[in-house]
Image: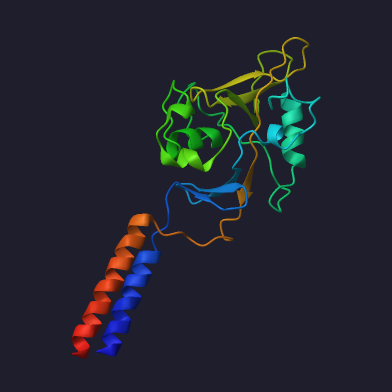
């Protein structure tokens, strides 16, 4: 009977841990939040969505000491950032193939807004009741820069931005023309090697796994009798 018990436990363990998390946020505990996306890719976000301000980044480079900055400054800030032992931070990428203002869920900020934090098109992310919103601090009810160039209608340089105020993705001038520069917030993210972290069981899977092991333990006691 001991052998039967071991085999049953093995089956439960394998079936339980073979299911990975789909679209999940995890607080790493070092000031970052890990995102495991539906396609299995992993991103690491700064927990502080306005770290440029709270870290005391060059006040001359940000607008009104609020954390907003021009696109070129945001690119430099993210690329030069050293945080939590990592130096490969960057600005999020937009989805140029999305031809609508809302519901651009394949952009990195759009995916976070709609599929992770319960954002609704036309509404601020701060109005979401999703508990995962509490994993982050200082999310601004405004626009955030992306690193993606926007197809320019003229000779000026444009880039995509994503609005946490309403879930919209669009483009704007980055500052090549005096008086037309936009100052938006910057939120750093980095890619995580998909092989560097093990699959994380879903909460329901963990519950079923625990229940199965408890049941098997009861069976073992019964067999001993």
Does residue 198 appear anywhere in the picture? yes
In depth, the one of 214 and 117 nearer the eye is 214
Nearest the camera: 107 or 212?
A: 212
Q: Residue 94 is drawn in which quadrant?
A: top right
User: Which quadrant does the N terminus fall into?
Assistant: bottom left
Left or right: where does residue 81 sit relative to residue 106? right
Residue 91, x across and y down, in percent: 66, 36
**Quadrant where the C terminus is found in the figure:** bottom left
Q: Is residue 140 left or right of residue 60?
A: left
- Among the 4 quarters of the image, the one containing residue 19: bottom left
Of all residues shown, which one is farthest toward the top? 179
Vertical side of 174 occupied by 57: above or below = below
Q: Residue at x 41, y 34 (%)?
A: 118
Q: Quadrant of residue 151?
A: top right
> What residue appears at the point 70 percent right and 13 percent down from the top-left corner?
154
Establish if 2 lies above or below 17: below
**Residue located at (57% from left, 28% from top):** 96
Tell whether 89 sits left or right of 11.
Answer: right
Residue 163, percent across and down? Answer: 55, 24
Residue 103 in view of the camera: no
Above or below residue 223? Residue 102 is: above
In depth, the one of 152 and 140 nearer the eye is 140
Residue 22: % across, % down: 42, 50
Image position, residue 112 (x, y; %): 50, 37
């Amino acid at each position: 009977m001991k052998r039967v018990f071991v085999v049953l436990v093995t089956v439960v363990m394998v079936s339980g841990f073979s299911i990975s998390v789909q679209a999940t946020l995890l607080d790493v505990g070092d000031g970052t939040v890990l995102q495991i996306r539906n396609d299995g890719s992993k991103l690491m976000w700064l927990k502080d969505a306005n770290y440029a301000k709270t870290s005391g980044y060059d006040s001359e480079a940000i607008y009104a000491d609020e954390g907003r900055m021009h696109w070129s400054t945001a690119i430099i800030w993210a690329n030069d950032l050293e945080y939590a032992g990592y130096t490969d931070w960057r600005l999020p990428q937009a989805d140029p193939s999305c031809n609508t203002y809302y519901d651009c869920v394949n952009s990195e900020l759009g995916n976070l807004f709609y599929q992770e934090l319960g954002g609704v098109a036309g509404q601020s992310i701060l109005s979401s009741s999703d508990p995962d919103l509490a994993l982050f601090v200082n999310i601004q009810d405004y626009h955030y820069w992306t690193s993606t160039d926007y197809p320019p209608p003229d000779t000026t340089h444009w880039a995509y931005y994503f609005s946490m105020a309403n879930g919209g993705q669009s483009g704007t001038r980055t500052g090549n023309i005096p008086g037309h520069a936009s100052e938006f917030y910057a939120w750093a993210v980095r890619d995580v090697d998909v092989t560097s972290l093990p699959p994380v069981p879903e909460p329901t899977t963990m519950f079923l796994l625990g229940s199965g092991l408890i049941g098997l333990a009861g069976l073992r006691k019964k067999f001993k009798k």
